[in-house]
């Protein structure tokens, strides 16, 4: 009655029920989740995919959206940078602003989402779900940015160069190690395509006189060049938004520059969004394949989970697996990055 | 300008960024998530709330919805039962059917959600997201249930009694330890309020002659009695649905029996649903307070996370924390449970 | 470079941007949504699928989960029943309890989800997201159920028979037309597989003496028989939970009774859940095809939308399209429904 | 037993069950949804809030995220612009690119999310959930942008000025009316804070020579000025992302410029995101109040619904309600917008 040949094709591996063991470490726990199903299985695969990126010579792009720094993820990202588990970070402006804030010695506070926000307004506290920040302290960080620009020349800066110089400045005067400072030290690039859309933009918007100029098209060229010149590229998305789209589009741009660019080879995303709303943030990597953004033979995994849970777990497991392993770093040289050779129309 | 007195009230504890440490164990990792925010913080609190239930004399109700057994969670639940981390399980029929299936020696298989389901139909494979089961094997388990009933007397059975007897039977002839068999051994009650709505119901529906009779109102009385006679009660919900509602309503019933029943003292739920759809599955414990289901001074936490991720993590951490701790078990005696003393209308 | 033959296969119909027109009626508006994408396109298709069910001789099962009656959907369901846009309703107990409550002349109240639930407790108000109910009034409805049973014989009742008799009783003494009363009048069957898990169960649980007995296996047999004897069957799910699973399993049961049952021919669901959590509530109809629950050549559509929005829209559009159309009703006779001819094991 | 004084405070308005009526028009249908609950009630309120914005002298900011133009929403936005139901549009780059694409005479196509994306890659089709686009046609639109820049002077442009000039150019040579062309004609400002993160950025990234320069800080200043000088401001968010954050931050910037800026007076969002993930896209307007972005006494509503459903409904109802009503337009003059008077630090 049933087609048993077909069946053989589908039945490869049994579900292996998760066994609770008090002696387990995090890497092992995640490995054993790989025997289960649903999002636990995806979480497990995420560690494997990232590990493989680290053990092949892959340029790793890391997109960071959502209020991850206020939520206590700053040091996780710093760990990723310091240990070069990532090579290029694309972030929302907000995460970088809150990183600056913590580098300068300010704090975020644990709060509650069940609170009267008018009371918070009275108290000068700004809420991010269950986190509070103090308004004058945020203003102090704004002021740092506002004044930092005085040290720069009057010319356009890519966001990468701007953030590199800010990292350098903060490395000298900051009180804590942060994303910007560790990236400055480790040679990890940071791009912020929507930098004006954040407190960084607000601070610079308050300056009188000529506007400070960001060369956002320069960012596009550089990241496309990085992708095009990589032996292989991998992408990791924490949330969606601009960082996800911007990293995905590097492949499209690289392709249109007439280089052979087959799509990112590795792809991992942690998301709380769903495909059926049609937006880029929740879309599958399969959809991205139709655009040539993700390679046909890529290894890819989507984990539907709050990143505050998934990211610390994955990175802790990676730390255990990479102990004593020396990763070969990809070249991140941008000397000729501004030279587009030719385009599809030439 | 700002009300600094008010502010003091809100600023109690700083966010403490998560530090990656390869040497961490799971309990410690979850403890450190408690310094962060969003769902990681809730996950951390979930361990604390459950730990406190175990260390006070609390009767613990555990609601199990979603396809947790096919997804590899059978042994996690068995661990909870064996170690008496729970006292009373309320489950969907499906989880119990798939438990029977694994006890009888059959397997579930890892599959893919990106598959042509007509091909699976041809192959006689039934899909549960990324898990497959073999149709004839499911039929064999149906047959076990179909024939099991021959051993029973012709009278109504509460689902608890029915499942207890089935656990006893399976303990003798089953090939693996499962939820039903371990509950039989450990004295943990199992209720299945919608037992007809599952392969158990299908199997019994296939029998000719008089219908097998479940005494589902008996289940209502027993569980209300358990709640009413508990020194304190706590609830843990894996998903929503019937198990969540049924456990919540035990407080309402207990109250209407004119006993002083202040609501469940501890409440923990792991859910992928949201409050704004208005359904019971996604509702907050605060909403349940308005009904008197959850006590005013209860300790409660909602974790928005796939249970296949959250449950193994929480239970592993609990296993570490409860090492060497002897829990005092609550009385689970049902001798007089059928005697309703008086109701609100008397 | 691209495979233009393949392309031709994919490009059939252009997106037709939605044109705003103040003179549009609801049916026309939904029709024009059919030219768009994402969930608007699915909503549009939902009307077409339901309309086709009504214009072919299809037995229509309607699953009702979620707090739809408190949310103001009672009269929509009454409309569906009166006009026989559905033939068989499977509901959660809660929806039926709240229907009884409104039939008896009580009300639900508009509230807020941003409220202090301890204040509501003080005030004796029970919250369902942004709806309130008055506790003594709920108790009065409980009492109606509690006393209604006195009129019944001492024997097991299927939930269908029980609800039919209650509908008859309420038709005489109720103050409003409701789901139960209109179903009684229109010959629409109502099943409630988890009837104990609701205020109906609570009310009956408060009765002293022998427990009232529901024949829930009888429900399984009857609904399988209805499916097996239908020329074609269609399913409509408002939310997931028990009603969805119960209706889907009628095909499995029918099949195991060795009748040729090819799966439901039409399938429409309105859901706020997602497939990636692995549960039955959020699963696709494609998954259901692997089980043989939904026919291979079925017409099917999933609308990801709050049912309080989608249902009134769809039903209003249907009302416009069915004006003057006389639907041929399917036979709903259950005379021999308890006779299972033979099973797969005979 | 219960506090009846408290109760009186909570019970103001009954739920009024939705009555199906084939003769209803869309405005009336939405009005009657206002008597229900959950998201239907919010959808109804959304029309009221927007209507009030239009009937008071309010500057209306409209944030557009998600793939709304490919999904068939171009003409809805054009209607909003032409009829001046909005005054200032903040959009993702993607929506504007797809608008340009349709203005130039190309189409999007209805597709399926259940498709093999490698086949689509072979066929040169790019997928956006259930919509396809033809790759060479996208390249042709890219080329339009690539060449358009030749007509501009070598100096920084705000995205508003750039998009205004492009709208002017397209108004002459385009084949259809679109967002850019209608905004050019109607004097509605368009901002695109992350313009580099889209095919617009890709096209400009392909140009050799000096990079085209966007003055994104100029955008920040202008929009803050618009907000600060408005008699009252209202915000409407379709999805979250950059547009939502950018519009919200105009209030923060305006405040820091030492103007009295009390927060936006009206706030309406249509979202498929949830607050509990902690991100800006899903956050409540209450959270925004703590930052001073939304006024204390604002009228605000969140509708959890796919925008392809909610937006056409709301706009059709508005079209009916505004028939014959002449809206008084707010001043949108930017003459002195670049002059920041003083900041909080002066």
Image (spheres, coloured by chain):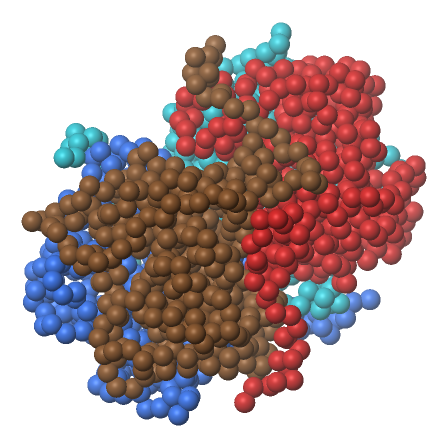
Chain colours: A blue, B cyan, C red, D brown
Judge from the rendering whether residue D242 lies leftward or rightward of residue C82; answer left or right: left
Q: Position of residue B258 (x, y in %)?
A: 55, 13
Up/down of D16 relative to A86, above or below: above
Q: Residue at x 22, y 75 (%)?
A: D155
Residue B346 appears in the rendering: yes
Image point (79%, 38%), residue name = C83
Question: Is the N terminus of chain C in the top left, top right, bottom left or bottom right quadrant?
Answer: bottom right
Tag count: 0
Snapshot quadrant of residue D117: bottom right
Residue A151 lies, with reference to residue B159, above or below; the image says below
Horizontal side of A223 relative to B182 (left or right) equals left
* Residue B130: percent from left, percent from top: 59, 61
In this image, D341 relative to D172: left or right? Answer: left
Up-down: is B162 above or below B40? Answer: above
Q: In the picture provided, is B5 more to the left or to the right than D82?
A: left
In the figure, C283 relative to A3: above or below? above
Q: Position of residue C246 (x, y in %)?
A: 72, 44
Which sits in the foreground, C50 or C325? C325
Identified at 20% across, 30% down, the residue is B6
Quick check: can you spot residue D302?
Answer: no
Please tell me in which quadrant of the rendered image residue A52 appears. bottom left
- Name the residue at 51% across, 79% down: D137
């Amino acid at each position: 009655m049933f087609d048993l040949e077909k069946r053989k094709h589908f039945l490869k591996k049994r579900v292996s029920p998760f066994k609770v063991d008090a002696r387990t470490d995090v890497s092992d726990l995640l490995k054993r989740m790989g025997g289960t199903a649903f999002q636990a299985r995806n979480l497990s695969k995420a560690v494997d995919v990232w590990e493989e990126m680290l053990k092949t010579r892959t340029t790793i792009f890391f997109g960071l959206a959502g209020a991850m720094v206020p939520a206590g993820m700053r040091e996780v990202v710093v760990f990723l940078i310091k240990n070069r588990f990532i090579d290029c970070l694309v972030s929302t402006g907000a995460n970088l602003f809150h990183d600056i804030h913590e580098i300068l010695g300010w704090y975020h506070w644990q709060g509650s989402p069940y609170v009267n926000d008018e009371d918070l307004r009275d108290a000068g506290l700004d809420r991010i779900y269950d986190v509070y920040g103090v308004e004058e302290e945020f203003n102090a960080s704004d002021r740092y940015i506002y004044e930092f620009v005085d040290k720069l020349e009057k010319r356009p800066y890519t966001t990468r160069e701007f953030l590199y110089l800010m990292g350098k400045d903060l490395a000298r005067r900051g009180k804590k190690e942060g994303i910007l400072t560790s990236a400055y030290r480790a040679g990890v690039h940071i791009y912020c395509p929507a930098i004006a859309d954040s407190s960084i933009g607000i601070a610079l918007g308050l300056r009188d006189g000529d506007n400070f100029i960001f060369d956002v098209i320069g960012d596009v060229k550089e990241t496309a060049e990085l992708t095009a010149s990589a032996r292989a590229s991998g992408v990791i998305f924490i949330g969606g938004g601009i960082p996800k789209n911007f990293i995905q589009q590097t492949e499209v741009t690289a392709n249109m520059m007439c280089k052979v660019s087959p799509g990112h080879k590795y792809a991992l995303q942690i998301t709380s969004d769903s495909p059926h709303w049609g937006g880029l943030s929740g879309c599958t990597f399969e959809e991205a394949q139709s655009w040539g953004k993700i390679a046909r033979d890529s290894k890819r995994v989507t984990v539907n989970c709050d990143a505050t849970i998934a990211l610390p777990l994955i990175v802790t497991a990676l730390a255990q697996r990479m102990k004593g392993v020396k990763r070969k770093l990809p070249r991140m040289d941008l000397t000729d990055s501004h030279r587009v050779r030719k385009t599809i129309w030439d």
